[in-house]
Image (cartoon, rainbow, N blue to C red):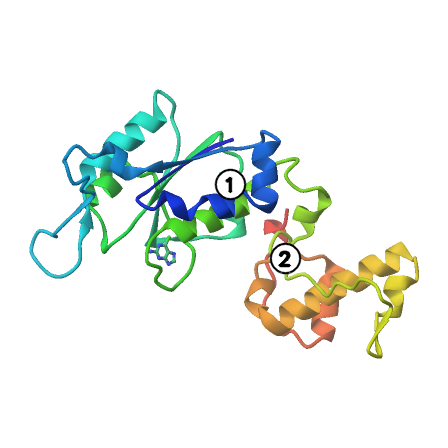
Amino acid sequence: MRIDILTIFPDMFPCVLDASIIGRAQDKGLVDIRVWNLRDWTTDKHKTTDDTPYGGGGGMVMKPEPIFAAVEDIRGEEDAPVILLTPQGRLFTQAMAEELAQQERLIFICGRYEGVDERVREHLVTDEISIGDYVLSGGELAAMVIVDAVVRLLPGALGYERAAAEDSHATGLLEGPHYTRPPIFRGWKVPEVLRSGHHAKVAAWRRKQALKRTLERRPDLLARAPLSEQDKQWLREMGYQGPFKNDSETE
Ligand code: 6GU
C-alpha cells in the first residue's frame, strides 16, 4: 500500500510514523508512506498556502491552487482516493479503517485554519473524514490516527496475526480484561479459569467478559454487534433489555 500525506507541517509526522507497528510495517515493505510539504507547490515568494475568506469574517482559508497541483503531481496517472481530514467529515470507525486497508493507494490532505476552499471539496476530494466530535488545530493528528488504524490491519503488520481480529471494535464489542504474571499481585488474583489450561472454558469466559464490559460501557454497540444465540442469552441474563441486530443482517 502507498500512502501520501499532504500537510503544511510535515515535521509533525516522522516520530509517529517511524515508531512501533507503523515503523515496522514500513521496514517490511508493507506500506510506503510519504509526507509532502504543501508549500513546495506554491509559486509565490512567501510560499502562501492560505488567504482571507471572500465575504469577510475571521480566519483564513487554504488556497486551492497548491492543493490541486500537489495532488495531481502526487497522484500521477493512477486513480486514488483523496481524503480530506476535516471535523465536517464522516465519523471514522473500525469499519472505515477496514475499507481503507483494502486500497492500493490513499492520499490524505490535512486541513488547517478555518478550512479549505470549497472547490477542493467539490472537485478534488473523494471523501471527507473526521475522527471525533471535537476540534483539532488541523488534520495532521487525525491523519496519523487513521494511518495507524489502517496500517495495523495490513497482513503481516502485527506479529500475532489473530490480534487484530480480536481487538476491541473489530468484533463489534469491547475487549474483556487481560492478565499476565504474577498470578497474585498485592493480594489480587488472576481469575482461576485463565490458569486452568481449559481452552474452551477460557474462550467462553473471555466472550462473556467482552459482552459484560460492552454492556457496562458501550451498550449502544450491542444493537449493532454480530451476536450468537448464546451471547444474546448471556446478555439477557446480565440485564440487557435493548434490541439486537436482525439475524438476517448477521454475517
Ligand atoms: Cl479530521 N480535523 C480537525 N481539524 N479537527 C478534527 C478532526 C479533523 N476530526 C476531529 N476533529
Can residue 132 be seen here? The reply is yes
Q: Residue at x 19, y 39 (%)?
A: 47
Q: Residues within 10 Å of mark 2 (few under 14, many from 20)?
A: some
Amino acid of disc 1: Glu
Q: Determine which of the numbered discs, if any, sits on residue 39 in the image.
A: none
Upstream in the sequence, badge 2 or badge 1? 1
Q: Residue at x 51, y 43 (%)?
A: 17
Closer to the camera in the image, 131 or 182: 182
Which quarter of the figure has residue 205? bottom right
Amino acid of disc 2: Ser
Q: Is residue 249 left or right of residue 124?
A: right
Disc 1, SS:
helix
Q: Position of residue 81 (x, y in %)?
A: 39, 35
Q: Is residue 23 above or below residue 194?
A: above
Outermost residue, front direction? 45
Q: Is residue 90 above or below residue 10?
A: below
Q: Residue at x 89, y 69 (%)?
A: 192
Which quarter of the figure has residue 212? bottom right
Q: Determine which of the numbered discs, if any, sits on residue 168 in the image.
A: 2
Q: Position of residue 225 (x, y in %)?
A: 61, 57
Closer to the camera in the image, 96 or 66: 66
Q: Position of residue 223 (x, y in %)?
A: 58, 63
Which quarter of the figure has residue 216? bottom right
**How many marks on residues?**
2
Q: Residue at x 53, y 38 (%)?
A: 101
Q: Determine which of the numbered discs, if any, sits on residue 99 in the image.
A: 1
Q: Position of residue 251 (x, y in %)?
A: 64, 46
Q: Is residue 54 above or below residue 220?
A: above
Can residue 97 be seen here? The reply is no
Closer to the camera in the image, 151 or 8: 8
CB at disc 2 and ligand 1 closer than 8 Å = no
Using the numbered discs, state the Cα–Cα distance from disc 2 to disc 1 in whole angstroms.
17 Å
